[in-house]
Structure formats: C-alpha cells, structure tokens
Image (spheres, rainbow, N blue to C red):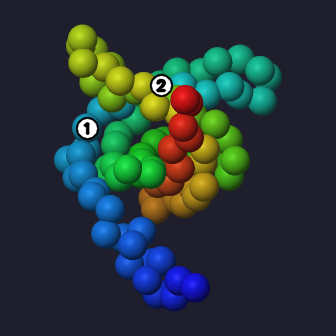
Amino acid sequence: MVDITEEIDERRSSLRVDMEAERITLAWIDQNNQEQVDDGICIDLSRRGVLVEYKQGFKVGELLAITFNPDNDKKHTVKGQVCRSTSGQPKSYHIAVQLISTE
C-alpha cells in the first residue's frame, strides 16, 4: 500500500516548465455551442497539466484546447479539462487545466 505522502511527493517531483508568460491560444465551446478562440498566457506547464492566465474564468469540467507557439510551424495543441479557476485580480484568472490523452 502506497503512503499518501509518497503519492504527493511523486506528483510534485514531475518536471515543471516555467513558461515565462508565453502567449498561447485557447479554444473552447461556449454555452451557445459556438467555438471561441482567444489568446491567453501560459504560466506553468507540467507533464499532466497547464496553468493559464486568462481574462475570464471557466467552469470546472469545461474542455479547452491549448495551442503553444500558435504563430509558427512549431505549434502544438493539447486538450484538457478545467480543474480549478481562481480570480486574483479583476479580469485576471488563473485556470488550472488537467491534460487529457487524445490517443
């Protein structure tokens, strides 16, 4: 049986990449079933998730497509589900997204 402390240490030992406020593109389906696309800021990236700064919050469970390097040939899109959305300042939200395997 695995100790809960060991599980937490294991999760936190995964490599995190400081994205130094890199611009990303977010895409999602709104409540009117329309695709929305806008720019956000990637704050932190790990093997299992992304921390994004955006001007509005999202509901827990919403699905997002996140595109890194959107303006060049190295662009890469990942998909994830919002697991936390917190407001730090007016029109500034930190959105935690758990990545979803698309394989």
Q: Quadrant of residue 13?
A: bottom left
Q: Nearer the viewer, mark 1 or mark 2?
A: 1
Q: Residues within 10 Å of mark 2 (few under 14, many from 20)?
A: few
* Residue 60 spot, x, y in % from top left: 68, 52
Q: Residue at x 52, y 21 (%)?
A: 37
Q: Residue at x 42, y 68 (%)?
A: 11
Relative to 98, is 67 above or below?
Answer: above
Q: Residue at x 24, y 13 (%)?
A: 72
* Residue 6 spot, x, y in % from top left: 43, 83
Residue corresponding to mark 2: 38
Residue 45 located left or right of residue 60: left
- The residues bearing labels 1 and 2 have C-alpha atoms spaced at a distance of 14 Å
**Depth check: 88 or 6 in front?**
6
Relative to 39, is 63 above or below?
Answer: below
Identify the secondary structure beneath mark 2.
strand
Relative to 67, is 89 above or below?
Answer: below
Relative to 80, is 15 above or below?
Answer: below
Residue corresponding to mark 1: 22
* Residue 84 spot, x, y in % from top left: 58, 58
**Depth check: 71 or 79 in front?**
79
Q: Quadrant of residue 32?
A: top right
Going by the numbered disc 2, the residue's amino acid type is: Asp
> Can residue 90 be seen from the camera position used here?
no
> Can residue 46 be seen from the camera position used here?
yes
Quarter of the picture containing the N terminus is bottom right
Identify the secondary structure beneath mark 1.
strand
Quarter of the picture containing the C terminus is top right
Going by the numbered disc 1, the residue's amino acid type is: Glu
